[in-house]
């Protein structure tokens, strides 16, 4: 043990690390970190390690083995040991553990098949849903929810956060961005419309907080559906802080639609029987998944996250570089490749063909 280390208890170090991350991580992320480190703190207590200065690579190996012995999935081990390594890296920076300890922690590798969620919504299914929404529920709140989620690849929290003032469809709308410190006034003179601007606010936080703020360009047809919804079907309501949500409720205590309500709408929209027959040979008169609150019981229904996954995959299949997709959906290129990139090999080959042709022409 180095003489330069300063004593600190495991639980105190965890609290210090999470407190440091508060300005850059969402509350849900911090909760997941604490949950993943809870077994480690408990293990340290059981082993009599009340000072992290005493922690060695052998201790980490024994802790890893104790977690494996519980029969945890490799993906779970990957998350827990990966978070532990991040924590130990912080501990090294504050002289709580030896500087070379983080490099000795081996995070269990996970096969791609175990890392990704295969329940993405395919582009074909998404297009079917969009076509039916445009035909039967044009410019409804439900229609706008799906269009924006599929088109922008946004997270659920981002969609809930949108206000009317975050929609920029006309030149006059740009006046709202004038004189803002983070906006270049010269850029506003040449910016193309339409777009929406995801903003982090205390009552409607984004996952990555300020780092998650970004304007996202919209196709003209998607913007037109949003305009039509605002003009015809949106119920005018304001929050207690006088913010005017884009997606409002018709009645009730809260004017802004909740995440749980959007989730329910998505489960409903992705049920195949909403637009045709049941592929599971169920009796649509008595199917439990058609009961209120039970929509998720349909094997084909999807939650919001697979829509984001499918949207990102579709962007990649259409040839969008990971770096461009990452900025649009607020993720890193590495995360795009590892967790959201579910390529169809034929589409991906076709999207690369332009690079082949480009090389032949030189």
Image (cartoon, helix red, strand yellow):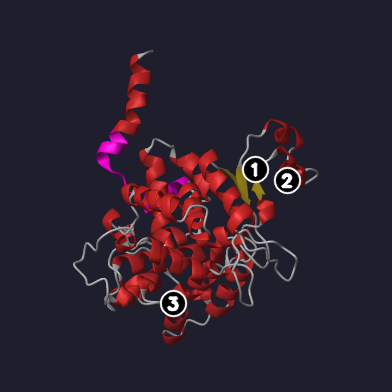
223 vs 240, nearest the viewer: 223
203 vs 35, nearest the viewer: 203
Q: Which residue is mark 1?
A: 169
Residue 339 numbered mark, or none: none
Q: Quadrant of residue 96?
A: bottom right
Main SS category, magenta section: helix
Residue at 21% x, 70% y: name it. 282
Image side of residue 313 versus residue 166, left or right: left
Pointer 3: residues within 10 angstroms few (<14), some, or many (20+)?
many
Rendered-image quadrant of the C terminus:
top left
Tell me the SS state at disc 1: loop
Mark 3 or mark 2, earlier in chain: 3
Q: Quadrant of residue 234?
A: bottom right
Q: Which residue is mark 3?
A: 40
- Residue 295 highlighted magenta (yes or no): no
Outermost residue on the right side: it is 179
User: Does residue 53 sit above or below 338 in this rendering?
Assistant: below
- Image coordinates of residue 155 in percent, x first then y, are 50, 58
Q: Disc 1 and disc 3: Cα gap in Å?
A: 51 Å
Nearer the observer: mark 1 or 3; the answer is 1
- Residue 342 highlighted magenta (yes or no): yes
Q: Which residues are magenta?
A: 333-349
Is residue 109 visible in the rendered image? The answer is no
Residue at 44% x, 73% y: name it. 36
Q: Quadrant of residue 170?
A: top right
Mark 1 or mark 3, earlier in chain: 3
Residue at 39% x, 71% y: name it. 60
Residue 182 numbered mark, or none: 2
Image side of residue 69 versus residue 328, left or right: left
255 vs 357, nearest the viewer: 255
């Amino acid at each position: 043990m180095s003489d330069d280390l300063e004593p600190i208890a495991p639980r105190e170090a965890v609290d210090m690390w999470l407190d440091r991350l508060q300005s850059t991580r969402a509350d849900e992320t911090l909760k997941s970190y604490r949950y993943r480190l809870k077994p480690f703190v408990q293990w340290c207590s059981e082993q009599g390690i009340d000072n992290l200065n005493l922690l060695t690579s052998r201790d980490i190996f024994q802790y890893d083995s104790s977690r494996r012995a519980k029969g945890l999935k490799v993906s779970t081990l990957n998350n827990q040991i990966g978070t532990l390594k991040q924590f130990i890296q912080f501990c090294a920076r504050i002289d709580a553990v030896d500087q070379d300890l983080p490099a000795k922690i081996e995070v269990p590798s996970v096969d791609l098949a175990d890392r990704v969620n295969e329940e993405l919504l395919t582009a074909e299914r998404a297009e079917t849903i969009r076509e039916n929404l445009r035909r039967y529920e044009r410019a409804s709140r439900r229609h706008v929810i799906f269009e924006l989620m599929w088109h922008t690849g946004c997270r659920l929290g981002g969609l809930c956060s949108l206000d009317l003032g975050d929609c920029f469809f006309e030149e006059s709308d740009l006046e709202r961005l004038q004189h803002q410190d983070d906006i270049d006034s010269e850029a506003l003179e040449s910016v193309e419309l339409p777009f929406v601007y995801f903003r982090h606010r205390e009552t409607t936080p984004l996952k990555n907080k300020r780092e998650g703020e970004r304007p996202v360009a919209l196709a003209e047809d998607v913007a037109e559906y949003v305009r039509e919804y605002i003009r015809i079907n949106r119920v005018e309501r304001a929050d207690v802080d006088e913010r005017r949500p884009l997606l409002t409720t018709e009645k009730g205590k809260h004017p802004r639609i909740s995440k749980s309500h959007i989730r329910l709408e998505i489960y409903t929209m992705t049920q195949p029987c909403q637009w045709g027959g049941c592929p599971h040979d169920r009796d649509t008169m008595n199917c439990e998944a058609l009961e209120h609150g039970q929509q998720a019981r349909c094997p084909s229904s999807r939650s919001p996250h697979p829509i984001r996954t499918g949207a990102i995959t579709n962007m990649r299949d259409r040839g969008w570089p990971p770096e461009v997709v990452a900025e649009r959906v607020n993720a890193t290129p590495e995360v795009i490749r590892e967790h959201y990139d579910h390529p169809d090999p034929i589409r991906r080959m076709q999207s690369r063909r332009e690079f082949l042709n480009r090389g032949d022409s030189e």
